[in-house]
Image (spheres, coloured by chain):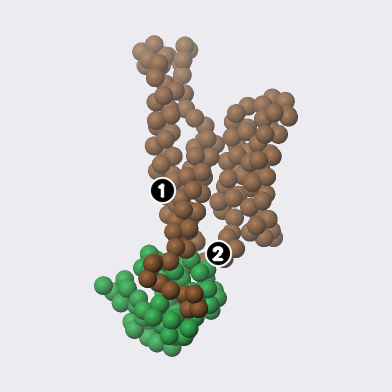
Amino acid sequence: MSNRLRELRAARGWSQGDLAQHLGVSRQTVNAIETGKYDPSLPLAFKIARLFARPIEEIFADD
Amino acid sequence: MLSSRATRRVGVALVVVGAPVLHYALPGATWIRTSAAIAAGLMVVFFAKEAIDDERVRSLKLRAISAAFSVSFSLTLIVNWLLNRDFDPRRDFDGATGTLRSISAFDLIVMTMIVALALFHYWRRQDGVAAPDIVEPGA
């Protein structure tokens, strides 16, 4: 699964740590999601979608 | 309720202080008793909550312990084979002259926890390594 998390985060000028704080996860988790090492759970994916005010399918794509 | 750091310190104390005290300072020392203290300490360390205990941490811990159990089970088979190299079923299986030896369940837990802790911290460290093309804002 690929995602646009890094791009969306960069657009807001946030560091991985900033995004992690908004999501209530660790910076390592944000990095793991961005690098494709980890696919977030549905609740976390919804949280990300709400944070960036976009539908989930605009952020995550099934390759 | 203890904090994650305090819980981990209790676990480390069990291994570093508790196990040697049980083994050397108290009478009637047996390896099983020492091994039980080490196993308990390592379990406390492994299952202690992380500072940020998110879903990735829980997922990695589950992966680590699953892999560690397979590794330590294989190691147990190898160690037991070494312990029983001179075991002759026809001579020893009557129960009077010999018995099949095995490491204890505590030893298995110690091995499992050591491997699980190593795997978890390695994978966690890998998570923190950003891809080379990732540049943090302001970096």
Query: Dot 2 surroundings within 10 Å: few (below 14), some, or many (20 or more)?
Result: some
Q: Which chain carries label 2?
A: B
Q: Which residue is more in the foreground, B102 or B126? A: B126
Q: Mark 1 lies on which chain?
A: B
> Vertical placement of B104 versus A25: above or below?
above
Q: Residue A29 at what x, y percent from top left?
A: 47, 67
> Vertical placement of A1 versus B91: above or below?
below
Residue at mark 2: B53
Q: Is mark 1 on a helix, strand or loop?
A: helix
User: Which colour denotes chain A?
Assistant: green
Q: Which residue is more in the foreground, B21 or B136? A: B136
Q: Which residue is drawn at 53% across and 77% down?
A: A18
Q: Residue A1 at what x, y percent from top left?
A: 31, 71
Residue A9 position by quadrant: bottom left
Q: What element carries label 2?
A: loop
Residue B74 position by quadrant: top left
> Vertical placement of B133 versus B32: above or below?
below
> Vertical placement of B101 versus B50: above or below?
above
Residue at mark 1: B67
Amino acid at circle 2: Asp
Residue B39 position by quadrant: top right
Q: Residue A40 at what x, y percent from top left?
A: 41, 70
Q: Which residue is more in the foreground, A62 or A16? A: A16
Q: Residue at x 37, y 86 (%)?
A: A55
| In the image: residue A50, left or right of residue A3 | right
Query: Dot 1 surroundings within 10 Å: few (below 14), some, or many (20 or more)?
Result: some
Amino acid at circle 1: Ala
| In the image: residue A46, left or right of residue A25 | left
Q: Inspect this view and state whether residue B60 appears.
A: no
User: Which colour denotes chain B?
Assistant: brown
Q: Which residue is drawn at 44% across and 59% down?
A: B126
Q: Residue B77 at what x, y percent from top left?
A: 40, 32
